[in-house]
Image (spheres, rainbow, N blue to C red):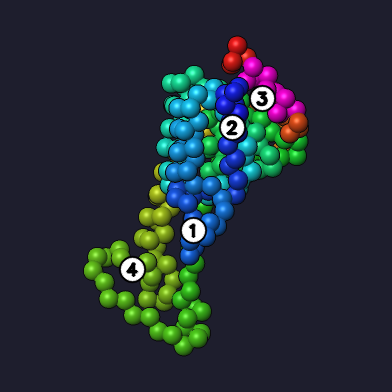
Amino acid sequence: YNKDVGVAVLNIDGPLSYKPVTIMGFDCGGASYQQLKEDFTYLVEDGAKTIAFSVSSGGGEAFQMMPTASYMRNLATERGVSLLAYVDGLSASAAYVLSVIADELIMAPGSEVGSVGVLVRLMNDSKALEKEGFERTFVSAGDQKIPFDADGSFRKEFLEDIQSKVDTLYSEFTEFVAEHRGISVEAVKSTQARTFLPERALELGLADKVMTLEGFYSYLADVAQDETT
């Protein structure tokens, strides 16, 4: 953060989560939405007029990704702060949500953006436990409390419930990207959660410009000078 010229760069690196991820008191890397909001608020209140996101992340937790992005976008609009996003490698899924709120989304040559989709990974260890001689017995209340059928497979109702939630989040996700990129929801959905290199990303409206890292910092200085003036 260069306070003299009111320019700051926020790094959005690694896996994203709602809260900082720690194990036994050690930071496990990545970025948290809580910390990003705190840092962004500090910079704006301290007088920053140009803030750039340096993004290198494959995404992460869906919970609070869009509210966090909206909070930063609204605060920047209220305070007249220019936002730039620079994709220095990869901006995918939740990371792309944080990128699209920028006034300009700029990619490094060879970088990728996209992966506008939702994924839930389920692990069923029933067969492995059975093979090892373990028998599971559930005592519960509530018809939907147990996700497994008698044979150990996931219940149809359980999977349908998760799919319904995934579909809802996907609809919100695609609408968010469409709104902030100024393209149609259908165009966003047509990407089928793929990631794209710069040339194709520009054609699809997923990004605005392509610059080397050195070129971006020069451009950032020009934007900051205009804001200061």
User: Who's the residue at 56% across and 50% down the image?
Assistant: 30
Look at 50% across and 31% down and name the residue there: 43
**Which of the marked residues, 4 or 2, is nearer the chain's N terminus?**
2
Q: Nearer the viewer, mark 4 or mark 2?
A: 2
- The residues bearing labels 4 and 2 have C-alpha atoms spaced at a distance of 51 Å
Magenta part of the protein: which range?
A: 215-225
Q: Disc 3 vs disc 4: Cβ atoms closer than 8 Å? A: no
Secondary structure mostly taken by the magenta-highlighted segment of the chain: helix
Question: Which three-letter amino acid code belongs to the residue tagged 3?
Answer: Leu
Residue with the mark numbered 4: 146
Which numbered tag is attached to residue 22?
1
- The image quarter containing residue 208 is top right
- Closer to the chain start, of discs 1 and 2, is 2
- Above or below, 189 against 221 in this view is below
> Could you give the CA–CA distance between mark 4 and mark 1, rounded to whole angstroms?
30 Å
Q: Nearer the viewer, mark 4 or mark 1?
A: 1
Mark found first going from the N terminus, 3 or 1: 1
The three-letter amino acid code for the residue at tag 2 is Tyr
Cα separation, mark 2 vs mark 3, equals 13 Å
Is residue 4 or residue 179 the one in the foreground? 4
Asked if the stretch drawn in magenta spans residue 224, the answer is yes
- Of residues 157 and 8, the one nearer the viewer is 8
Q: Which residue is mark 3?
A: 220
